[in-house]
Amino acid sequence: MTMRSEDSVLDHYQAMELAVSALLIDKGYFSAADMEAEIDAMAKRTPDIGAAVVAQAWTDPDFKARLLADGTAACESIGLDMGPTRLMVVESTETVHNVIVCTLCSCFPRMLMGIPPDWYKSVNYRSRVVREPRMVLKEFGTEPSADVEVRVHDNTADMRYLVLPRRPASTDGMSREELAKLVTRDSMIGVKIVEAP
Amino acid sequence: MANAGRMHHDMGGRDAGPVDRGGHSHPEWEKRVDALMMLLSNSKRRVIGVDELRRGIEELGAENYSKMTYYERWVSSITHNLLEKGIISSDELGRKMAEVEDTARAAGDRG
């Protein structure tokens, strides 16, 4: 494959994507409408989905037990499409703080949170969080005390981790919807904690 | 750090600088690449698996890996996998790329 002339208004890789998609549509692998629907579906996958799962786990002990035992099955039981990957939910507690990474590439629980933030895909995050997690957490303003064990979980192509963050104190009277609003993407990655309102 | 025998994508534990948390753009063409991979990997089609995507990215080599952007790696790996599986040929890919570039250029000239 050769690069086209410099005056091309399309970047080489943009042209590659358009050409490949057009060929696959010609060959009947999928339709242009399938592609549009997929783009729309991905746009709808946001951390709000994961936040709702976390809030349900905080307020429904039976669901929480099922979520920790088999994340994929528990999420599918509440109607979430989990795609081809398995989900493993890890609970942060008084004694354990969990954080996730993908050292080999950028695997992320995207069915529950959408596409990962750029820093999650960065060389620096991937390299360091497994070796000096407390230093990296500190850059995010998170400093677990020395007696808390920090566990780093490395995602793979087929298996994705989601952090079940600790429910903040003084949120006892809050509804599931109110709780979900407190849960951020970064808290489900584990680089931040969930703050009380 | 001992990095002997490691491939370039295997980054866990290497020396690296602070995490840059700024900037998060996701242009339209990247969304199309993402959608393309989702369509090819879903359980209805299973044309390319996520593991195959990753292998294709790893095989880009250290130099390309560091030069290319994230979704450039994806679309290169997807294309390579499709060529390897014989789903598309390099001839038809070359022709189609020339065609989409000509179309874009014509549209650009009109604008």
Image (tube, coloured by chain):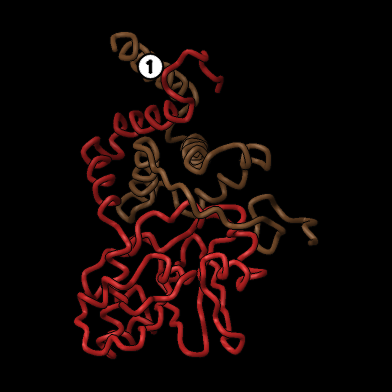
Chain colours: A red, B brown
- Residue B15 in the image: state x and y as whole percent: 72, 58
Query: Against A98, is A125 above or below?
Result: above
Q: Quadrant of the C terminus of chain B?
A: top left
Residue closer to the observer: B69 or A70: B69
Q: Quadrant of residue A138?
A: bottom right
Q: What amino acid type is highlighted by mark number 1?
A: Glu
Query: Against A100, is A120 above or below?
Result: above
- Residue A156 in the image: state x and y as whole percent: 52, 63
Q: In the rendered picture of this protein, how many numbered marks are placed on residues? A: 1
- Residue B106 in the image: state x and y as whole percent: 33, 11
Query: Against B71, is A186 above or below?
Result: below
Residue positioned 48% across, 25% down in the render: A12
Q: Quadrant of the N terminus of chain B?
A: bottom right
Residue closer to the observer: A10 or B15: B15
Residue positioned 42% across, 66% down in the render: A186
Identify the residue position indicated by label 1 in the image: B99
Q: Quadrant of residue A78?
A: bottom left
Residue positioned 22% across, 84% down in the render: A174
Mark 1 neighbour class, 10 Å CA radius: few under 14, some 14 to 19, many 20 or more: some
**Residue that sits furthest to the front in the current view:** A197
Residue positioned 43% across, 82% down in the render: A91
Q: Chain of mark 1?
A: B
- Residue A50 in the image: state x and y as whole percent: 32, 69
Mark 1: which secondary structure?
helix
Q: Is residue A163 left or right of residue A150?
A: left
Q: Is residue B79 left or right of residue A104?
A: left
